[in-house]
Structure formats: C-alpha cells, structure tokens
Image (cartoon, grey):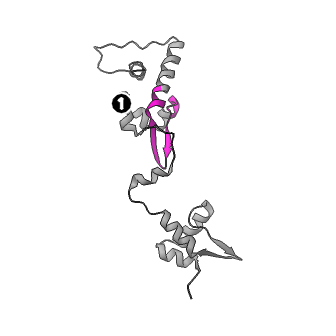
Amino acid sequence: MQKMMMNETELAARWNLSPKTLQRWRSEGRGPRYMKMSKRVVYPIDEVFDFESRALHSATWARATDVVFPDGSKLMDAREISYVTALPLYVFTQKQVREALGIPHRRVEKLIRFDYEEVIAWAKRWSQDAEDQGIHAKIDPGEQRRSLQQALASLPV
C-alpha cells in the first residue's frame, strides 16, 4: 500500500529542515498545502511533490519570469540604468535616495529593476518641477563634478 500522507517530522527529515521551520512556513502561508486533523498536521504526498516541482529552477534569473510586465518594457538593473542615463549609481542603489526622489522602480522577487521609459518620464517631470520652482541647472564645462540637478538637466529628454 502506498503512503498518502506525510507528517511534519517525515517532511522535515526529507528536506533536511527543522519541524519548527515547517511550522513557521505554515504561519507565513509558505510551503506545501497541509491538512490539520485534530492537533496533527499532515501533508498529502501529491502536495509535497507539487511544491518540490514548483521549486525547481534552471537558472537564477528564471524565478523573475513569473512576474508579468507590460509588452515592450525592458527592465534594467541599477548599473545599466545608471550607465544609459549618465546619472550617479547611488541614485538607483540607495533606497532612501530612490524613494526621496520618487524614482519609478519595480521589485522582482528581491531585485530592484527600472524601466527606461519610466525613468526618462520621471526625469522630465523632475526637471520641469525644478524649473517651475525657479531652479535652473547651469552646466559649467570646466567643473569636474556636477550636481544631480545638472545630471538630470543634461538627459536627452
């Protein structure tokens, strides 16, 4: 006779986890679906196999393909968007700066990605708001460093 259910201890041993980890996963809504019979928790074998097959990935980036984005959107990481916009890298990598400036971004799993068109539209709005407030970015070709405002003003918008 084939076994239909697995208890918490058996599943923890199968995955080399602590039973406490499975308990935490259940409280967080993670892990395979389970059944609770009185005080006993059991996992149907089919649910365990299903969960294991969904956890299989051929590459690290494959996990990000579960997220659906609008057609034609090319998502870039912080280094790429910094390079194409010529804006400082810290603007995209530092969470506080990114949020303070309102830079549009998307979270793909634990990764932060940027859509070029959205960033350019944001830069246009940001530059226009600065001009509306009477702030003009004067670009001095002899100066070694430039401000964020000067960098945004020099974007091809």
Say which residue label 1 marks.
84
Q: Is residue 138 above or below residue 70?
A: above
The amino acid type found where label 1 is placed reads Val
In the image, taking residue 149 as reference, residue 43 lies left or right, namely right
Q: Residue furthest front?
A: 71
Instruction: Magenta stretch: give its range.
Output: 99-120
Split into 4 quadrants, where in the image is the N terminus? bottom right
* Residue 14 covered by magenta stretch: no
> Which SS class for mark 1?
helix
Question: How many discs mark residues in the rendered view?
Answer: 1
Residue at left offset 61%, top offset 65%: 26
Packing grade of label 1 (10 A; few <14, some 14-19, many >=20) is few
Task: Name the quarter where the C terminus is drawn.
Answer: top left
Image coordinates of residue 5 in percent, x first then y, are 59, 79
Q: Can you give x and y, in whole percent of width and height, for residue 47 in the image?
A: 57, 70
Judging depth in this view, the residue of 88 and 121 nearest the camera is 121
Question: Left or right of 59: which side holds 95?
Answer: right
Q: What residue is drawn where x is 48% and y is 13%? A: 135
Vertical comparison of 65 with 78: above or below? below
**Residue 40 found in image quarter:** bottom right
**Measured from the top left, where is residue 71 in percent x and y?**
49, 39
Quadrant of residue 151 within the rendered picture:
top left
Residue 7 is drawn in which quadrant? bottom right
Residue occupying the far right of the picture: 38
Residue 105: within the magenta?
Answer: yes
Along the horizontal axis of the image, is 156 left or right of 45?
Answer: left
x, y (%) of residue 61? Answer: 40, 51
